[in-house]
Image (cartoon, grey):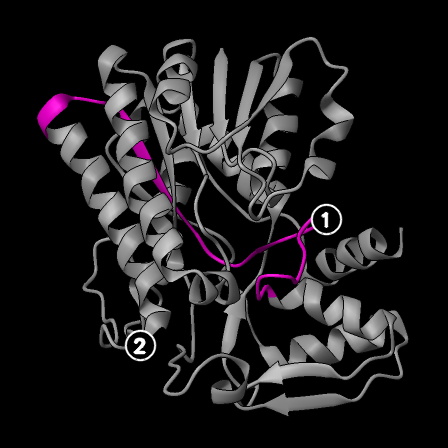
Amino acid sequence: MKALITGGAGFIGSHLAERLLREGDEVTIIDDLSTGSFDNIAHLEGNPRFRYVIDTILNEGVMADLVAESDIVYHLAAAVGVAYVMDNILKSLKINIRGTEIVLEQANIKKQKVILFSTSEVYGKSNSLPFKEDQDRLLGPTTINRWSYAVTKALDEILALAYWREKKLPVTIVRCFNTVGPRQTGQYGMVLPRFVRQALLNQPMTVYGDGKQTRCFTSVLDVVDAVYKLAQSEKAVGGIFNVGSDHEITILDLAKIVKKRTGSKSKLELIPYDKAYESGFEDMRRRVPDLQLIQKTIGYEASVGLDELVDSVIRYFEE
């Protein structure tokens, strides 16, 4: 297969590129390096089946050529991370909405399959747990910037499904829950790499809110494996799939695990949301996926435990 990965120099995109190359595919990535890094793909440069383009997906001429040359498009390019999105609202809206529209428009010309990466953020602050793909969503007011990302990704999903229903463009949507592993940085608000970096430097480990909010953390390798298998499945076309782990942990307990496994002398410091982000910031207390659909479709099971996952991130930062 000839695969195009938008946002391929990012955390998940670079791991996906590695997996596709191991499977024998030809891989082209496009990335504007706004949140991705060339360091993530530098080791792939010598592979004759790999090439990269440093540009934005908003460049329609470039995207027309790249999509036309491809058999499948993995669309990851987006503004990511709570901190980054809230600091770049207008840019995030444009790349997440218009960027996805360009990908779908170009893929529709030759009907290339599109794997659209969405997010657990679309569920908002619903208390109906675990989150199931077809359940109602609950978002906060438009005056709270925090919800802009969820709105753009929900619109992406609606656009993709409209292309599937009206144009028969084969699309599959994956809603990623908290995905972590080597190459992820804490620069844009990702919690585990931020904790690890602070712990290794014996700096205060900053826990936002009261730390009792829970999340489910999944290895990027498990996520990439699931995405690859969904891309091969005809049963997955036209569907939305949660991808993640359903094992909850509080953010405070996660910080304690990181501190223990690094042997850090760091102190845990609680930071109010208003100070960490903006006045009126809202967060969800729990975020847990229902995994029945993806288990039924491809037999998915997360294989990397939390301790192993934390250790892999520690090793990455130590190196």
Q: Which mark is residue 182?
A: 1
Instruction: Name which residue lies at 81% across and 59% down.
Output: 314
N-terminal of the pair, mark 2 or mark 1, is: 2
Q: Is residue 8 left or right of residue 104?
A: right
287 displayed left or right of 191: left
Could you tell me what secondary structure mostly forms the magenta stretch?
loop
> Is residue 168 magenta-colored?
yes
Using a 10 Å C-alpha cutoff, classify the residue at mark 1 as few (fewer than 14 neighbours), some (14 to 19) or many (20 or more): many
Give the residues in magenta. Answer: 166-190
Residue closest to the eye, 5 or 143: 143
Left or right: 159, with 80 as reference point: left
The amino acid type of the residue labelled 1 equals Pro
Which callout, 2 or 1, points to the residue nearer the camera?
2
| Percent position of residue 223, x then y | 54, 43
Does the image show residue 133?
no
Question: Residue 169: percent from the left, percent from the top?
Answer: 22, 22
What is the crowding at mark 2: few (fewer than 14 residues within 10 Å), some, or many (at least 20)? some
In which quarter of the view is residue 130 placed?
bottom left
Q: Is residue 180 above or below residue 2?
A: below
Q: Which label belongs to residue 144?
A: 2
Cβ atoms under marks 2 and 1 closer than 8 Å: no
Q: CA distance from mark 2 to mark 1?
A: 32 Å
The secondary element bearing badge 1 is classed as loop
Check disc 2 and give the amino acid type: Ile
